[in-house]
Structure formats: structure tokens, C-alpha cells
Amino acid sequence: MGKRRILLPLARPIDPQELKGLVIGKLWLEGDEFVLFHVIESPAASSLSLDQFKNQIVEAESWLGEIAEGLSRGGIKAEVKVAIARDAADAIIEELSESDYDLVVMLKRKKGLLKRLISRGVSERVASSVSVPVMTLLMGEE
């Protein structure tokens, strides 16, 4: 099997060694190419102008870049992408429709009972809306 292109949405920074352990240790995805993808969510009442989000974009690219560098030192190729959208799930679905991916790995946070009853999570919304396989990993309490 050739190298796969894998979308890895990240809502917040994660330790590169922990991520490497998940990617190689649990998923056996060694040798694949990752796209670390972060969505900056914009309130419905505001504009989606890039200028308005310049500082947030720079900050996200910085922490994503640190993660990518940490993965690179471990032999894992990773690139960084940042998007601005009203909704994270919609942005992930759009990214999947516009680029060629073989897999999505979603890092899912454990929700409390009330939150599970009230809303569907991003992982569930993405998985039910795309044809690309979606793998979810439970990361801990929200």
C-alpha cells in the first residue's frame, strides 16, 4: 500500500510525542502524510474576512507548526492548514471535498451525559457526511 494522505483536525495544541504515540502506536499509520487542520470558528454575526482573524491565524499556524516539527523529528511528514468558518464540522467536510484524502482521524473528547443528549459532536457530523473513512480516538474528558 502506498502512502496515504490523512486529515487530522485539531481544536487545540497537543503534545507531538503524545500524537506520535497515537498515530504510530495505536493506528500503525507510519509513513503516511498528515495534514494538521485547525478551524477558527467565526460567530454568525461577524465577517469571515481574513484580516479580522490575522492574529488567530498566526497563533494557530504557530502551534500547528510546532506539532508538525515534533512529528517530523519522529519521521512523520505533516503539513499545516488553518481555515475560518462558522462551524468546525462544515469546514472539515469542505476540506475533505476539496482535497484528496484517504482517511480522517478525529481526536474525540469524552462528553458528559447531558452534553451527549443535547448535541451531536463534530466527529459524528463529519462521519455521517463524508465518503472518506473516519477514525475516532477518545482523548479524555471534555
Image: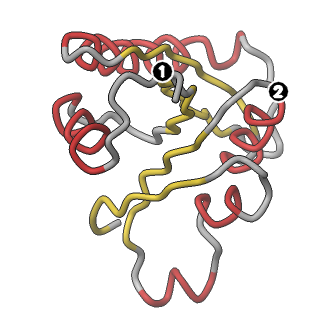
- Residue neighbourhood size for the residue with mark 2, other residues' Cα within 10 Å, grouped as few (<14), some (14–19), many (≥20): few
Q: Is residue 112 left or right of residue 69?
A: right
Which callout, 2 or 1, points at the residue further toward the start of the chain? 1
Q: Which residue is mark 1?
A: 33
Q: Residues within 10 Å of mark 1 (few under 14, many from 20)?
A: some
Residue 15: % across, % down? 21, 33
Image position of 113 with respect to 102: above or below: below
Q: Determine whether, in the image, residue 91 is placed left or right of residue 111.
A: right
User: Residue 93: x and y, percent?
Assistant: 76, 44
Depth check: 10 or 45 in front?
10
How has the structure been colored for display?
Answer: secondary structure
Nearer the camera: disc 2 or disc 1: 1
The residue nearer to you, when weighing 138 against 59, is 138
Q: Is residue 66 left or right of residue 134?
A: left
Q: Which residue is mark 2?
A: 98
Give the residue at x 48% y 25%: 34
Answer whether labels 2 and 1 touch (C-beta < 8 Å): no
| Amino acid type at mark 1 | Glu
Q: Residue at x 69, y 17 (%)?
A: 52
Q: Is residue 124 above or below residue 7?
A: below
